[in-house]
Every structure is written in structure tokens, then in C-alpha cells.
Amino acid sequence: MDWIKVSIITTNKGIDPVSSVLNDLGYDGLEIADKDDFKEFLENNRKYWDYVDEELERLKEADTKITVYLDGGNDGLSELEKIEKSIKLLKEADINNSFGSLKIITENVRDEDWSENWKQYFKPLEIGDKILIQPEWQPLESETDRIVFKVNPGMTFGTGSHDSTRFCIEEIEKNIHEGDTVLDLGCGSGILSVAALLLGANSAVGVDIDALAVKTAVENAEINHVADKFTAIAGNLTEQINGKYHIVLANIVADVIMVLTEDIEQYLYPDSIYIMSGIIDTREQDVLDAVSEKFEIIERKEEKGWVALAARLK
């Protein structure tokens, strides 16, 4: 089935009047994009991240709009005509132009599974000397000597393609030993935990505050037949963690890494490796200042503004 996407460009003050008009016409499921709310959200929550994607930054300047979807057939065209007439009357009543242009934009859209559409952009990826990350739904195109890591990230972040994630896998490959234990803080879809297990770790514990991410991490461990060695915890960083680990991973952001470093040594053996990533280059010195008293940096990687550090206790 095809649809007619109808978007009405307005202002923040026009959201309620336009919504009321559409509600009166029988439309309750409205898609509202409030430019001011989005801009406020980004600015007020910037402390939780170091980097905002350029696409999100551009959305701050996008129009405020209210969207409804109509049947793509003749009934939909008839409904569109009613909407156009009602919005025209609203515009005429807005003598102070408080609601903006009230411009109507229409677009024909196909009925497809939007939740699956992103898969076309996820391609096989070689990382380091040993790992091949392979979309779970895609067959191998040719034989390989690499360890095939099948991944289905679901709707959570984590396919292994991001520079910070790739850095971590390369560091795991370089430092892992058969039988090692791994702690993965902020595990997302479990990419690093499962990679470590495939590279020879005896066990891995992945922690994430997002329960959906934890669920996806377990599924990725199952897909790769290492679920019996993987423990997933929905929680905040080390709050539910005990014991020591040979490799500890923190692929998060600079501020969280700095907080972790205050007591992370209790989870490390004297020769354990502490891998920190997700650090933008402008925050690297802050992280170095926070870890330098306790840790010696043994490896540093940088690419496209992202920095990863591997360290040992002094």
C-alpha cells in the first residue's frame, strides 16, 4: 500500500492550532517535529556526549512541522483536499502571522518495512588481521581465513564500523591471550565482547544501561555460538561488577572514562590492559590528565578526530 505524506510547516506557536485542526478532521496519530524543543534538548543534554553527528546539528535548523499519512488512493486525495481547505481557513484567521506560512508539503511514500531499511548500508568489514564482521542476514561472498563474526545490531548502536569500535577490536586482537577474562563497559550491541570471545577470551561480561542493547548483545553472542561464555548486565557501569579482568574496555565518552578511572584499578590485575575509546581528539588531554597518575599509556591510535588509548597500571 502507498501513502501520501502530508507535512504542514508552521512555528512553535502553530503546533497546537494545527494539531487541533487535524484532530477535528479525525487525525489523532500526528508526527510533530518541534525545532525549538529539539534545539533545547541538544543544548541541555550536551554534557552527556562529546560529539553530535553533523546530521543532528543540521536538524536543529529544520522547520517545525506536523505530519500525517493518508491513503495513497482516491480517498487520500479527498482527505488531502479537506486538510488544505482547513489549513487555509486557519491561515486566514492568523492575522498576526503567528503560525508562519502554514505551507503544506506532500510526498508519495511506499509502504515498506522502515525498521529493516538500514540493512542495505551495513556491509562486510575486515578489522585488524583476523576479524571479518559479516551481517547476519547476508551470506559470505567468498571463503576467508578470517574469523567470521556474524552481527545483527538490531535497532541499537554497534556494527563495528565506527572508528572507536574498530580501534578497540584492533587492540583486543593485539593484547588478548587464550583464557583471558574481559569486562566491556558500555557494551552496546556486544561487538567488543563477542569479538574478544572469538579471539580466544575465556569469558566476557558486557554492561550497558540500555536494556535493549543488552538483549541485542546476548543475541549476537548466540549467533556466534559464544553465549555460554558471555554475561550481559543491564546496569550503570561497574555498579554490579565484582572480580578482576585481564582486559577492561571503556568505549564510551571522555567524561565517563574519567569517572571510571577513579576506581577502575580494583577490577584489574597488575598486568591487565585498560582500553579507552570513543574519545574525540579535543578531549584527549583531559583523559590523559585523569589517568596519568595511575596508568602508563602503552598504545595510542587516532583517526578522523577519534582517539583510542591502551594503558597498564603503573
Image (cartoon, rainbow, N blue to C red):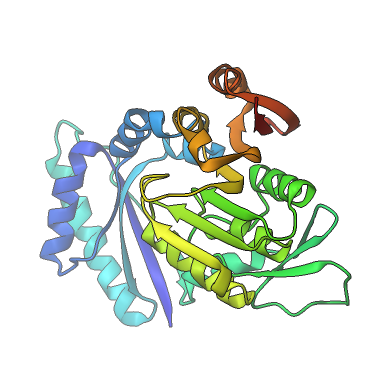
Q: Residue furthest front?
A: 270
What residue is shown at x 51% (from left), y 32% (from top)? 257
Which quadrant, please, contains the C terminus? top right
Residue 307 seen in this snapshot: no
In which quadrant of the rendered view does residue 222 lie? bottom right
Viewer-nearest residue: 81 or 268 = 268
Q: Residue at x 76, y 70 (%)?
A: 148
Q: Position of residue 26 (x, y in %)?
A: 15, 70
| Position of residue 113 in the picture relative to residue 249 (left or right) | left
Image coordinates of residue 180 in percent, x first then y, are: 66, 55
Q: Quadrant of the N terminus?
A: bottom left
Viewer-closest of 244 and 256: 244
- For the residue pair 306 and 243, the one nearer the viewer reads as 243
**Rendering coords of residue 89 (x, y %):** 16, 51
- Seen in the picture, residue 226 relative to 162 is either above or below; the reply is below
Left or right, 13 with respect to 205, comes to left
Image: 140 above or below 84: below
Q: Which quadrant of the structure image shows residue 229?
A: bottom right
Instruction: Specify the quadrant of the image occupied by residue 29.
Output: bottom left
